[in-house]
Amino acid sequence: MADGSNTIMYRFLFLWILGYVSFVNCEVGQRSRRFEYKQSFKGPHLVNKQGSIPFWKHFGSAIAGDEQVRITPSLKDQKGSVWAKTSNVNEFWEVEIFFKVTGRGRIGGDGLAIWYTEGSGELGPVFGSSDNWKGMGLFFDSYDNDGENNNPYVMVMLNDGTKSYDHFKDGSSQQLGGCMRDFRNRPNPVRAKIRYLNNVLTVFYHNGMSNKDDDYELCMRAENVELPKEGFFGISAATGGLADDHDVLKFLTYSYRQPVEEKKPAKEISEEERKKLEQQYDQYAQQLEKEKETYKSQHPEKFKEENAKYENAYDRDVRLIYEGQASIHSLIGTLHGKTGELTTQVNNLHNTVAKIQAGGSVGASSGGGISRQEFNSLLNSQNELKNIIYNIRKDIESMKEGGANSDRLDELHRNVRQVVENVGHLVTKNQMSGGAHQKKQECPKVNCLSTRTFISLIVIQMLAVIGYMFYKSHQDQAAKKFY
Ligand code: MAN
Ligand code: CA
Ligand code: CA
């Protein structure tokens, strides 16, 4: 129990350290501004083939075209709206709207509204949308209902769902802030920028007298504004006794996000703090290791059982390498012994032939024995054989020292084949000369060993060597599969 609770405690502390570092990063980082395509629309190709705006829905008199959405035509008593299908989930944001209010009269009506509300609005009395909303409405009020000679007017009104917009007083006592601007019949689209960042709500206005992006001016600013953390963007318009075309060309939304993906670990905290945290981490890691050891010493049977049951990958590799090396070493040792025997026998053969030569029995060629030329040839072959066997020994020695590889084995194999060929040659020669020679030239009574017997022995030894070589080569390949 104590072990378990300690482990949990260390994990908790480790997570706490990580959490602390992340928190520091978030707090000091700059927010990133990102375009939200699902909360936006703009022409050209504002509508799809079905005539609807991707990610948006429109109501009432609203008609979507390729370049713009006409929320109301310049006809009496019209209402229309367009709402984003999905809610905005980013706490802070900015929208930029491009629109045109156009009418033939010197006075027009009634106006257009931009919304950010908790729920998606329906057709209603407030510039074409629902009253008693929860959130924010920015109104472009064309008609001076209260006769204060202060329209067209731009104003912001907040609502927590309890207020009803006073249409006939132009909501004058309900506004959070605003500015008096004539937005009707401008040569270029009029623009508004609403920024909600760190609970500050700011409205910038572009009068449409130019097409320049930086011709914005401040219309209103309010601090400590609380808007829904999640909500719907919408735009609506209405006409009454007087009517204008209300056209929206662009609705662009940007989010201000926390830079959670940007990681600058330890840069934002002081060096002293970093060292302290590192030390803490090391301490906990050491403590954890100690606890593990204690647990091991208290419950050794658990670890023994586990270790006995399984062979880990490292142990298995070492075992396979050791087995492969041992097998190669043993084969080379055997081969070395066999080659030594072979060398001795060839030396014996050589001595015997030399004795025969010394006895003069091969001095004349006319006497039925083998000629000197034949004898010299036989002797040369034997010397050659001796050299090859010597080379084989050398190869084996070097294999013992430096480990076997396939090139060396191939070379050894070639040498052995050459030995066999030479031995075959010797046998042939001996047979050719042997018949006549044996009649006249008896083998000495003492230490007599016939050439045929010797050669046969050599052939047998060679076959044994070749057999070992094939066996060894096969073993070597099998061992290679492990590495
Ligand atoms: C009429 C009514 C009002 C409207 C004005 C201007 O007076 O429809 O509601 O505001 O016309 O359109
Ligand atoms: Ca009005
Ligand atoms: Ca007014």
Image (cartoon, grey):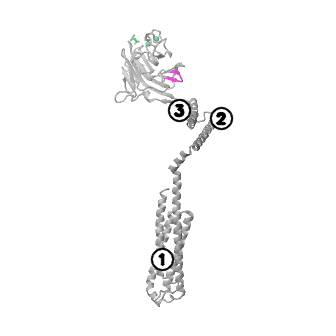
Per the model, the C-alpha gap separating discs 3 and 1 is 85 Å
Q: Residue furthest left?
A: 50
Report x, y in % for residue 479: 49, 59
Q: Residues within 10 Å of mark 2 (few under 14, many from 20)?
A: few
Segment colored magenta: 194-203
- Look at the numbered discs 3 and 2 and tell me whether their residues touch, using CB distance below 8 Å: no
Which structural element holds mark 1? helix
Report x, y in % for residue 364: 50, 89
Report x, y in % for residue 82: 40, 22
Per the model, the C-alpha gap separating discs 1 and 2 is 86 Å
Viewer-proximal residue among 87 and 469: 469
Q: Residues within 10 Å of mark 1 (few under 14, many from 20)?
A: some
Q: Which amino acid type corresponds to the residue marked 2 in the rendered image? A: Glu
Which structural element holds mark 3? loop
Q: Of discs 3 and 1, which sits in the foreground? A: 1
**Residue at 39% from the left image edge and 24% from the top image edge:** 69
Whichever of callouts 3 and 2 sits on the residue coming sooner in the sequence is 3
- Look at the numbered discs 3 and 1 and tell me whether their residues touch, using CB distance below 8 Å: no
Whichever of callouts 1 and 2 sits on the residue coming sooner in the sequence is 2
Residue 457's label in the rendered image is: 1
Q: Which residue is mark 2?
A: 272
Q: Which residue is mark 3?
A: 260
Image quadrant in which you'd find residue 397: bottom right
Whichever of callouts 3 and 1 sits on the residue coming sooner in the sequence is 3
